[in-house]
Image: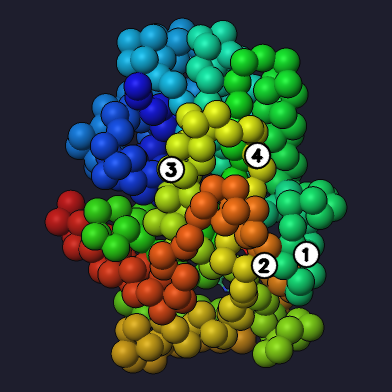
Amino acid sequence: MTVLVTGGAGYIGSHMVWELLDAGESVVVLDRLSTGFEWAVAPEAKLVVGDVADKELIGGIIRDNHVDAIIHFAGSVVVPESVADPLAYYENNTSKTRTLIETAVREGVPHFIFSSTAAVYGGAGLEPVREDARLAPESPYGLSKLMSEWMLRDASLAHDIRYTALRYFNVAGADPKGRTGQSTPGATHLIKVACETALGKRPFMQVFGTDYPTPDGTCMRDYIHVSDLAAAHRLALQRLRAGGRSLVANCGYSHGYSVLEVIESVRRAFGRDFEVKMGDRRPGDAAAVVANSDLARTELGWTPQRDDLDQIVADALAWERILTSKNSARG
Ligand code: UDP
């Protein structure tokens, strides 16, 4: 049995590949390498460069490798980009996922794990959000993922395929063993931006909004360590293989940190100060987005191992340093 990981050369996908290999699984990665990196794919995994909508290619991979599960990370993930170019997001995230599900059904792959997002909920309040909360994506990105969840639901009712969709909150950090991390240039995510600033890759960073209805006025998010997220997928795979029913579950720690708390944590990890400017709100940001993760804990038996902001930040910073030396070695 082999697991096919789409987008396995990307940030979360590359962690997933290590998680599976560490658990003794056989892994094939499919990646276009448009934003991912060949070097990010663990050498023990087989890498196929190609597109998830290439039915012939995927069919061949499934048959040749006896694939019994697909973990589907490939897709576009930049919210403002999805607002500027919605049709590209519906093509890349929704249409291509439809084709991939169709191929999975045709080839008889029984298990499908899908990377979804907290963006399906739209503006959440200060209370942790449950899976049955109102679904109101505020961006084409969120909607492109929600439509994929719905296609999986309907396909699983009609065909012999079961799925797990995991709705990620704010994924951050890096492999604690330093094997992979967030490597995409031009990052916009808070922890990565703060680490880059600490290391002098940016002259300063900005806090987007200080007048939110939160305890310190800055936005609150539920930051989850990427290794805990990969572990949740592995548990989801185990559960599906054991006959578990289809499931949609949040992946977060159920508590939030403010932007200022995150920056303080980066200062602690770095040991020195760096320049932070207070700026205006960024359009589209909700005041707080925090998961209720009871379902993942009970259904998947998920017990996070790295629920500690300082550890998330320390691992992100360590990876940022590794990335600096990788990039300078490449000239
Ligand atoms: N943020 C910030 N400065 C930055 C990047 C992000 O103040 O340079 C804030 C952003 O406004 C949001 C939080 O940090 O409130 C998390 O943003 P991120 O882009 O990491 O994730 P999102 O929650 O938007 O998916």
Q: Is residue 192 above or below residue 309?
A: above
Q: Amino acid at mark 2?
A: Val
The residue sitting at 45% across, 37% down in the picture is: 238
| Label 1, label 4: how far apart the Cα atoms are | 21 Å
What amino acid is labelled 3 in the image? Arg
Asked if the residues shown at circle 2 and circle 1 are in contact, with their CB atoms under 8 angstroms apart, the answer is yes
In the rendering, at what x and y percent does residue 161 appear? 60, 20
Image quadrant for the C terminus?
bottom left
Which residue lies under the disc numbered 2?
290
Comparing marks 1 and 4, which lies closer to the viewer? 4
Of the two numbered discs 4 and 2 on the same chain, state the one appearing first in sequence.
4
Q: Where does label 4 land, which residue? A: 247
In-front residue for pair 95/226: 226
How far separated are the C-alphas under marks 1 and 3?
A: 28 Å
The quadrant in which residue 156 appears is top right
227 left or right of 326 in image: right
Rendered image: mark on residue 234? 3
Give the amino acid type for the residue marked by disc 4 in the picture. Answer: Leu
Give the numbered dot on residue 124. 1
Q: CA distance from mark 2 to mark 3?
A: 23 Å
